[in-house]
Image: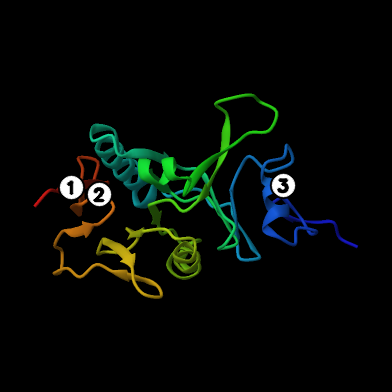
């Protein structure tokens, strides 16, 4: 009987993981792979070994993270996390590493979101965010279309996430959509074509633009708009 599935000779996924609790134990163990992105979505283990594209993902994520970090720190709003931050929600049967995650002070101080300590390493060492963060941002890549646009939004909604930002820079037209919670699912913010979109989480509107730099590569600019 097979004991694991091996991806590209780099990642071994045990076949006996049958629950979120078992996935969490594996993800916090010394046996969890240090490369690739491995998520657990309602019983489905998804492994993405694809490298990030430089100008449709990497520089875009850097801009979004930088602007939001300045906003969060400047107004003392909470804590922002980028890359390899594992978000867990038991009710949604979810363990995932989004591109960007934000948790407000209200969420953290109320216990709606809590930092899970790393076992055996003393204080101030944490490995997971458990609960319902205010914001999840995902940037679509070729290998994550189905997850980012269909499976993950449903589970983030079930997890109580307030806002879901979806960005796709792979095509001729840059797509940036802020999704708010509706009665049963996330719904895109109503906005005129190309206009700024309101974020309830930050109480600001945002506009995302791109243009070619001197090397003819994409440069991105995320603009917070107060009014």
Give the quadrant of residue 79. top left
Q: Residues within 10 Å of mark 1 (few under 14, many from 20)?
A: many
Q: Residue at x 17, y 47 (%)?
A: 223
Q: Is residue 20 above or below residue 193?
A: above
In contact (CB < 8 Å): disc 1 and disc 2 = yes
Q: Residues within 10 Å of mark 3 (few under 14, many from 20)?
A: some
Residue situated in front as seen by the camera: 97 or 59: 97
| Residue indicated by mark 2 | 202
| Residue indicated by mark 3 | 26
Q: Position of residue 173 (x, y in %)?
A: 24, 64
View extreme (front): residue? 110
Q: Position of residue 128 (x, y in %)?
A: 56, 42
| Residue indicated by mark 1 | 224
Measured in 3D between alpha carbons, the distance from the residue under mark 3 to the one under mark 2, in whole angstroms, is 35 Å
Q: Residues within 10 Å of mark 2 (few under 14, many from 20)?
A: some
Q: Residue at x 36, y 75 (%)?
A: 183
Q: Position of residue 119 (x, y in %)?
A: 68, 33
Q: How many marks?
A: 3
Measured in 3D between alpha carbons, the distance from the residue under mark 1 to the one under mark 2, in whole angstroms, is 9 Å
């Amino acid at each position: 009987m097979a004991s694991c599935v091996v991806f590209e000779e780099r990642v071994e996924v045990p076949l006996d993981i049958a629950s979120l609790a078992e996935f969490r134990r594996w993800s916090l163990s010394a046996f969890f792979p240090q490369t690739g992105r491995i998520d657990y979505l309602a019983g489905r283990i998804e492994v993405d070994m694809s490298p990030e594209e430089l100008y449709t993902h990497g520089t875009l994520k850097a801009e979004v993270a930088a602007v939001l970090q300045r906003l969060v720190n400047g107004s003392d709003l909470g804590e922002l996390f980028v890359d390899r931050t594992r978000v867990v929600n038991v009710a949604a049967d979810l363990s995932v590493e989004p591109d960007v995650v934000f948790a407000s002070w209200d969420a953290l101080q109320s216990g709606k979101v809590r930092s899970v300590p790393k076992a055996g390493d003393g204080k101030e060492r944490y490995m997971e965010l458990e609960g319902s963060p205010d914001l999840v941002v995902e940037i679509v890549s070729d290998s994550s279309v189905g997850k980012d646009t269909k499976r993950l939004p449903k589970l983030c909604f079930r997890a109580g996430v307030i806002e879901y930002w979806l960005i796709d820079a792979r095509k001729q037209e840059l797509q940036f959509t802020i999704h708010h919670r509706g009665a049963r699912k996330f719904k895109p913010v109503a906005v005129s074509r190309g206009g700024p979109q309101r974020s309830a989480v930050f109480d600001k509107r945002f506009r995302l633009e791109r243009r070619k730099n001197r090397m003819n590569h994409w440069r991105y600019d995320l603009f917070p708009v107060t009014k």
